[in-house]
Amino acid sequence: MLAQVLVSSITAGAVYALIALGFVLIHKGTGVVHFGYGDQVTFGAYLVLIGQAFIGLRFDVAVAGALVASVLLGAIIYLAFMWPLRNASLLARIIASLALGTVLREFLRSYMGPNAWPFPFLLSSTSVPVGGVLIVPANLAIVGVAIAVLVALYLIFDRTIYGKAILAACENSTGASLVGVHVSTVFLLIWILASVLATVAGILVAPLLTLSPDMGLIGIKGFTAAVLGGFNSLPGAVAGGIALGILEALAGTYVSSALKDMISYAILIAVILVRPQGLFGELTLKKV
Amino acid sequence: MLRIRDLSAGYGHKNVLNGIDLDVPAGSVVAILGANGAGKSTLLKAIVGLIGRSSGTIELDGKPLTNESADRTLKSGVALVAEQRELFKSMSVADNLLLGGYLRRGQADMREDFERLLDVFPRLRERVRQPARTLSGGEQQMLAIARALMSRPSYLLLDEPSLGLAPRIVEEIFDIVRRISAEGTSIVVIEQNVNLALDVAQSGYVMETGSITLAGTAAELRSSDTVQAAYL
């Protein structure tokens, strides 16, 4: 039973990790907590639906098109909103991110309707017994894609000078500028990368939740995972996602499935109260 | 030659620098002296583009130096080692150095420079895998200088390299400054330790409240009554 719970929890954990990574990337780079990020995840999935159901593209072509569109969306968000607001107060930028999410959500509600749409799984959703545990190929695909994305990001950040330049700009934008990194370009890349991550997460999670304008509430799970792992730590975001998936699954199985979401939010509150820097984040002390 | 004429700059609407004229001949060391609040650090920040200028011109080897941003100024060959060092403290010594060579990424001789600088700064070689935040103050200063040298600047601006460091470490750092200068890099050094600055420089300027009040060779400044009374 425990083995089954853990196996099942990895799927949710992998998606939470991707969403958490998007939150943390944006926050590390630009100081903004993008409260509209969950709605961007939804929008990314809808881009695939529009391509497939309305333009008549094959699923893989619709996915490619959605990823390209999400690059443009990320660039537009940064250039049209976040760059002009770069010197505004934190509150103004948070409100802007919330407003952005609302615009995306209500746009989808107006033009795609309020009802849920089915979204294709990447592989079969019929479970297969393997060594006493039921494995769903579709869930394996979700975990596989998430792992591939996370490994790719790790290699970029750890092994390439461009990835190190992004991390450097996130840590110290003055220092980055002094070594020749064009910091505003880095921030643009961060918003584009986060936008693409949102679309990938949306494509992975939509079959599990069914696609509706309100699917963006999944963003709160990603936010919780980021807080749990440490909002200034990229590895922490991944660990937080996996941990949240496991804790949620355990709570749902051994406490109450009806209270699963409540338990997740209780974890968020507990982390903020007891260890606000999360499991892997660093506590920042600021003199005021 | 780095030539600055009538440079004014500051923060917001308040000018901190007022009409600065300054020359840094190629291959020389120029010291900038002055008390706290004289505008010395602001001058270096205005040269590289960390702050904008409200008026004046900066020319590098006869061409206007755009100071839109520090990364663009570095492309022109002017590197700043800031007073706060601005290291990437969670990253290793090796990564800090590699990032110092960011504009030369992909060039075959970058690895050579990396090894050569670890020879110049053997303390850094001993700690090459350690995060920068675990280094002592002196080691962090060495790392900041080495990182700036990775870009092979023609002009190196040093803001208070001895600040907060033990005398032995300061001596080590200034020996390295002499060595860098001997290799042909032009250096501008801000230093509150006037003796040290005039030992290593060929010429210098004294700043007070955003203006240059005295200029001359190192020997002239050392023998100046004003400098002797105020700083020596």
Image: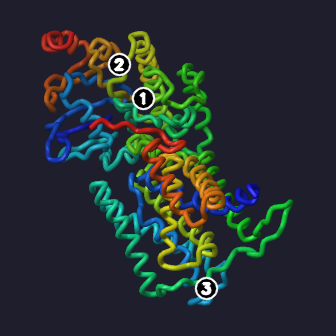
Type of residue at label 1?
Thr
Check the picture and name the quadrant holding the N terminus of chain A: bottom right
Q: Is residue A185 left or right of residue B223?
A: right
User: In the structure shown, which secondary structural element does the residue marked by tag 3 occupy?
Assistant: helix
Marks 2 & 1, CB-CB < 8 Å contact: no
- Density class for disc 1 (Cα within 10 Å; few <14, some 14-19, many ≥20) is many
Camera-side mark, 3 or 2? 3
**Residue B186's x, y, as percent?**
38, 29
**Residue B6's x, y, as percent?**
17, 40
Q: Residue at x 14, y 43 (%)?
A: B14
Quadrant of the image occupied by residue A50: bottom right
Q: Residue at x 55, y 24 (%)?
A: B124
Which disc number belongs to residue B164? 2
- Per the model, the C-alpha gap separating discs 3 and 2 is 64 Å
Type of residue at label 2?
Gly
**Residue A103's x, y, as percent?**
38, 75
* Residue that carries the numbered disc 1 in the rendered image: B185
Q: Chain of mark 1?
A: B
Viewer-closest of A185 and A112: A112
Q: Residue at x 47, y 21 (%)?
A: B136
Q: Chain of mark 3?
A: A
- Per the model, the C-alpha gap separating discs 2 and 1 is 25 Å
Viewer-closest of A113 and A45: A113
Q: Do discs 3 and 2 share a chain?
A: no
Q: Is residue B117 above or below residue A51?
A: above
Viewer-closest of B58 and A50: A50
User: In the structure shown, which secondary structural element does the residue marked by tag 1 occupy?
Assistant: loop
Marks 3 & 2, CB-CB < 8 Å contact: no
Which disc number belongs to residue A52? 3
